[in-house]
């Protein structure tokens, strides 16, 4: 028993040393917007979900750097350590040694993760746990329902504001939707004194959604395509247990969506073209939305069931259009995708009867270029024209770039 205890202690020392080294090396010049939200939260169990490449691991390590190093343990659940070590026992040992902050990366790669997390939460009230997972993972569907215990946060792609800070060193404030719509002229007058937003917007829409662009556009797009394959072949396949034929058909479906502007699905024709039954096709779209590959919207007032088809589909961000289509994407799709990416963080968005987006069941937004008019929404209260290609607006005409400061 003594030998076993010594071996166990040595293994724990090894993984603590690895944790300390990773935390010490993580850069802290740029932090995602969720960083402060997590630090300020009083929840003892926080889930950070997000697609591959959004910076979840870096976020965890930066959180560790905010605490006394002796009180923090970071572990990746795909580490070989966990082929012979139990997560619950690791947490117990760490807790018994005075540990207070347990950072768990990619919990979905550990069998029985939800049951052990539930026990850790219940048995160690002084231990704070932050864990990351694939955006596909539903914490309500594990062996143990963690939804009543865990605070779920979503880490999306870089916003335009975060892009400016990360790539250009330009710091701008986070703005509320109400302020953007109601005070945009005053905000632009202040922000644009020493900053020309349109100079950077095109680059953001081409290569700015993820924090790993290094100057070569073709290499960046290839990385995006590789990431899509990993999401399809590993994340979706492992969590949803789909066969590879189904995955191949989902890839074909994604390409079809990228090639249309934007995509209004005819499920019967699409089902025939892809080779998936109707219900399988609808479920595939839902999986792709969870994986943050696409956005879907349903028409205002329409009842939604598990197998309801969406009324309109976009790719999840503008960089994906450039990477997948291989051609110059249609400007209208890029504008609407830019808006959706930013609006869906913290706001309910629907497809209105007139206009492009209904936000919080209150604001109707019509998105377009410089020549876009109010004709379609002129009689709708709380309606706004959102224009690309303008630095400042007037009255109910708002520059599109401002919505990039929503998070």
Image (tube, rainbow, N blue to C red):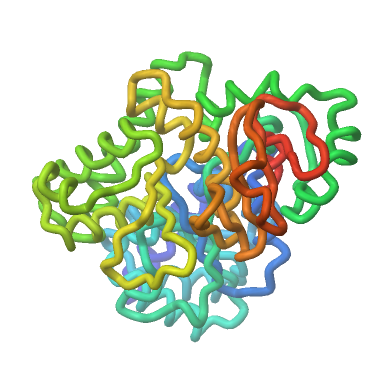
Residue 21: image location, x then y, percent: 55, 43
Who's the residue at 35% across and 42% down the image?
263
Observer-nearest residue: 123 or 255? 255
Q: Quadrant of residue 229?
A: top left
Q: Quadrant of residue 100?
A: bottom right
Count of marks, rendered view: 0
Who's the residue at 68% across and 34% down the image?
401
Who's the residue at 72% across and 57% down the image?
382
Observer-nearest residue: 220 or 28? 220
Rendered position, 314 above or below 35: above
Rendered position, 80 above or below 92: above
Observer-nearest residue: 28 or 398? 398
Can you see residue 215? Answer: yes
Can you see residue 13? Answer: no
Residue at the bottom extreme of this rendering: 122
Residue 305: image location, x then y, percent: 33, 72
Observer-nearest residue: 374 or 244? 374
- Left or right of 392 in this view: 47: left
Rendered position, 398 above or below 112: above
Residue 77: image location, x then y, percent: 37, 57
- Left or right of 71 in this view: 139: left
Who's the residue at 74% across and 39% down the image?
397
Residue 403: image location, x then y, percent: 68, 42
Quarter occupied by the N terminus: bottom left
């Amino acid at each position: 028993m003594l030998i076993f205890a010594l071996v166990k202690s040595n293994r724990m020392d090894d993984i603590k040393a690895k944790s300390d080294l990773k935390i010490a090396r993580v850069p802290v010049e740029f932090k995602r917007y969720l960083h402060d939200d997590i630090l300020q939260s009083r929840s003892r169990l926080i889930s950070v979900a997000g697609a591959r490449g959004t910076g979840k691991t870096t976020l965890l390590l930066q959180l560790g750097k905010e605490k006394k190093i002796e009180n923090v343990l970071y572990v990746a659940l795909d580490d070989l350590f966990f082929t012979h070590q139990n997560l619950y026992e690791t947490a117990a040992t760490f807790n018994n040694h005075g540990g207070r902050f347990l950072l768990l990366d990619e919990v979905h790669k550990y069998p029985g993760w939800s049951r052990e997390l539930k026990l850790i939460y219940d048995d160690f009230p002084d231990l704070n746990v932050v864990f990351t997972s694939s955006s596909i993972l539903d914490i309500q569907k594990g062996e143990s329902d963690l939804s009543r215990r865990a605070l779920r946060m979503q880490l999306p792609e870089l916003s335009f504001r975060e892009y400016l800070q990360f790539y250009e060193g330009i710091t701008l404030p986070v703005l509320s939707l109400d302020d953007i719509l109601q005070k945009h002229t005053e905000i632009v007058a202040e922000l644009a004194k020493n900053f020309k937003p349109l100079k950077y917007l095109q680059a953001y829409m081409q290569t700015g959604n993820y924090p790993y662009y290094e100057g070569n556009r073709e290499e960046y797009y290839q990385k995006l395509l590789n990431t899509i394959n990993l999401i399809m072949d590993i994340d979706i396949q492992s969590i949803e247990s789909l066969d590879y034929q189904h995955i191949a058909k989902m890839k074909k479906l994604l390409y079809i969506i990228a090639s249309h502007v934007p995509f209004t699905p005819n499920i019967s024709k699409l089902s025939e073209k892809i080779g998936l039954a109707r219900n399988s096709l609808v479920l595939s779209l839902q999986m792709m939305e969870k994986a943050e590959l696409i956005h879907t919207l349903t028409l205002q007032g329409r009842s939604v069931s598990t197998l309801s088809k969406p009324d309109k589909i976009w790719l999840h961000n503008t960089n994906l259009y450039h990477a997948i289509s291989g051609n110059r994407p249609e400007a209208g799709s890029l504008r609407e995708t830019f808006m959706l990416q930013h609006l869906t963080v913290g706001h309910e968005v629907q497809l209105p009867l007139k206009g492009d987006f209904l936000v919080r069941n209150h604001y109707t937004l019509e998105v377009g270029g410089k020549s876009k008019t109010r004709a379609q929404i002129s009689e709708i209260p709380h309606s706004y024209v959102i224009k690309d290609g303008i630095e400042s607006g007037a009255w109910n005409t708002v520059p599109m770039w401002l919505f990039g400061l929503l998070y």
